[in-house]
Structure formats: structure tokens, C-alpha cells
Amino acid sequence: MKLEGKNVVVTGAAGGIGAALARRFHAERAAGVTVADIQAAPVAAVAEEIGGLAVVCDVTNETAVQELVRRAEDAHGPIDVFCSNAGVALTGDEAAPDADWRLNWELHVMAHVYAARAVAPGMAARGSGYLVNTASAAGLLTHTGSATYAVTKHAVVAFAEWLAIAYGDRGVCVSVLCPQAVRTAMIAGRETGVASIDGVLSPDEVAESVVETMAREDFLILPHPQVLDYMQRKAGDVDRWLGGMRKLRARYPTGI
């Protein structure tokens, strides 16, 4: 898909990858860019910078997501591209508090479900549209220091796969963004551990990868191309891969 003339929504857009995506979509001459985040002042600043629409939105609330879609469509017409990008990074094993598990589930999974409910049927009826769901390389591989993150990011990938199967023959493209370390607030001060093994990318570099992949309409967006090799190794010999991940966890207990 070419982004020129398209109506785009980006959630989690107050900073990091979301803000970089919004700027890049604007540079690609999108007809309208709506940026959403729970952080009012930062997302308003991004909108002002690109001449977009800012919407304060808690994407774990379906009513709020529906209101976001309504405002974006009132401003710019039917939504062509919805980037469901909001996320959180919390370490935690099976003993993590239920509240942490719920937050990860609501933000990393249900927010994507709410977005799809709100826009995918309309896209299919028009025979055109694009859903971009931000997951993580952890959704394809794992995160050795956080069960809450790894499990819910796997679910993001699974839901994106399902959407691609259900809507792919109806004109709706689906991609899932799976980077490794990106220089955002999530890894601030922690760029010398396992996150740096394959390099820490800037949000702008990730946004470039997103646009390039959307042009090809590929499912996997892999800003770190090494991830594909890791996936293949995992599929080829799961037990060996698990052994390697145990060694990695022993070296970097927090996974970051």
C-alpha cells in the first residue's frame, strides 16, 4: 500500500515508535494522521508537529477506541490504515501480580481486538484497508525475563495471523511489527545487555521498515532481519533452541 492520500490512525503515539510512525506517515503525504495516546500533552505535541489530530485514548477501553475511530473518521473520512501500537514493558514471571497480567493482556491483546472490531469490517466492505499490529520479536521468539510480556506478545502475533487469514481475501492487509531493541523509554538505560546483541535501532529506523514492508504488503515487519534466522532455528530444533535460551537467560537474568 502507498500511504499518500490515506487516512491513518496510530495509537501509542506520544513518543517512541508511535510518534516516529506518525511523522513518517505525514512525510509520505497521508491525507490525515490521527495520533492517540493516554498521555495528553505529548500526543498533542506530536499532532501539532505534523498537523494531525490528537485524541486522548485509553486503548484498553473499547468505548474509548470506538470514540477514537469516530473522531478520526469525522475528521478525515474512512480509516485506511490503523496502527495498533500501544504497549508496556513489565518484567514478571508466573508469580507476577494478577494486575500486571491483566494490564499486559488488555494492552497487548484486547486493544488490538477492539481496533479490529471497530475498523476491519468497514475496510472489508470497502475492499481496502491495512491493519498494523505492533508486537515484538518476543512474540515470535520469547523474552527470557518476562513471562507477562512474552505470552501476550505471542498472542498479538497469533491474532494478527488470524486477521490476515480472515480478511486477506477481502482486501484488508495485515502486518505485525516485531522489532528487537528500539531506543525508546522502554529500554532507557538498559542498552548494554541482551537488547544490544543485534543492535538498538532508532524509532525512525523502525518506521522506515514499516513503510517499506507495507509497500510490499508482507505480513512480518522485521526491522532486525536476524529475527527471521532465529525463527527458522527455533522451528528446526525447538529443544536445541530452548537450551540456547536457557544459556542466554543465565547470562542476562532480566532479559534486558
Image (tube, grey):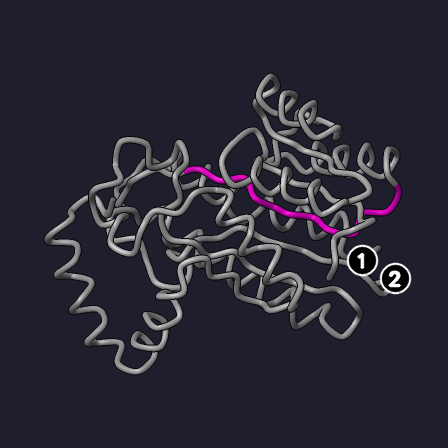
Q: Mark 1 points at which residue?
A: 121
Closer-to-camera residue (85/167): 85
From which residue to which does the magenta span run?
77-88
**Residue 21 locus on image (x, y percent):** 60, 43
Q: Are the residues tagged 1 and 2 within 8 Å (C-beta)?
A: yes
- Which quarter of the figure has residue 202? top left
Quarter residue 92 falls in? top left
Residue in the image at 37% along x and 37% along y: 98
Above or below: residue 65 compared with residue 14: below
Marks 1 and 2 sit apart, C-alpha to C-alpha, by 6 Å
> Which residue is at the front of the view, 127 or 3?
3
Please rate how many residues cluster around mark 1, counting C-alpha atoms within 10 Å: few if below 14, some from 14 to 19, many from 20: some
What's the amino acid at mark 1? Pro
Whole-percent x and y of residue 184? 41, 36
Mark 2 closeness class: few <14, some 14–19, many ≥20 residues within 10 Å: few
Q: Is residue 134 above or below residue 86?
A: below
250 sits left or right of 135 in the view: left
- Kindly report the secondary structure that dominates the magenta region of the rendered protein: loop
Tell me the residue that label 2 is attached to.
125
Q: Which residue is drawn at 71% across and 27% down?
A: 55
Q: What residue is shown at x 80% (from left), y 57% (from top)?
A: 121
